[in-house]
Image (tube, rainbow, N blue to C red):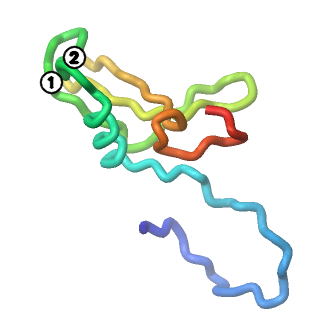
Amino acid sequence: MPAASKNPSPSSSSGSAPRPDATPAYTYSPEAAQAWIQAHWHGGKACPLCAANHWSISPELLAIPMARQSVPLAAMTCLDCGYMMLFNAVVAGFVPAKDGTP
Ligand SMILES: [Zn+2]
């Protein structure tokens, strides 16, 4: 489990009020996304544009801004021509839904 930062004060002995969760709920990993895509991709895996089979999964999620929130996306890119496939990361289960909306 990679820890992005350390807490300088190991404990708060007096405060019992719940803190707002500052940790992003994004648990995305490109390895898990790649495994999910391979499990769900039936048929040929050639790029629909150039017919190559050299794909790369995005190391981080992308986000498409919507009116009220953004949609987290995992991108798979053809390394030969740049064609991209986008996967809704909430629908695919890469990250939990915010406010119950995928
Ligand atoms: Zn291509």
In terms of image quadrants, where is residue 22? bottom right
Query: In the displayed image of the protein, which residue is found farthest to the left?
Result: 52
Relative height, residue 66 to residue 23 (above, below): above
Q: Which is more toward the observer, 43 or 94?
A: 43
**Is residue 77 rendered to the left or right of residue 63?**
left
**Residue at left 64%, top 86%?**
10
Q: Residues within 10 Å of mark 2 (few under 14, many from 20)?
A: many
Label 2 within 8 A of ligand 1 by Cβ: yes
The kind of secondary structure element at disc 1 is loop
Mark 2 is on which residue type? Cys
Can you tell which mark lies on residue 38? Answer: none
**Residue at left 17%, top 19%?**
44
Q: Which is more toward the observer, 54 or 95?
A: 95
Closer to the chain start, of discs 2 and 1, is 2
Query: Residue 31 location, x and y as percent?
Result: 31, 48
Query: Residue 90 location, x and y as percent?
Result: 54, 37
Query: Residue 16 location, x and y as percent?
Result: 83, 80
**Is residue 86 rendered to the left or right of residue 21?**
left
Relative height, residue 67 to residue 58 (above, below): above
Where does ligand 1 appear, by image quarter?
top left
* Mark 2 and mark 1: Cα distance apart in space: 6 Å
The kind of secondary structure element at disc 2 is loop
Can you tell which mark lies on residue 53? Answer: 1
**Residue at left 28%, top 20%?**
82
Query: In the displayed image of the protein, which residue is found farthest to the bottom?
Result: 13
Label 1 within 8 A of ligand 1 by Cβ: no
Mark 1 is on which residue type? Asn
Residue corresponding to mark 2: 47
Relative height, residue 64 to residue 51 (above, below): below
Query: Residue 17 location, x and y as percent?
Result: 85, 74
Q: Are marks 2 and 1 in contact (CB under 8 Å)?
A: yes
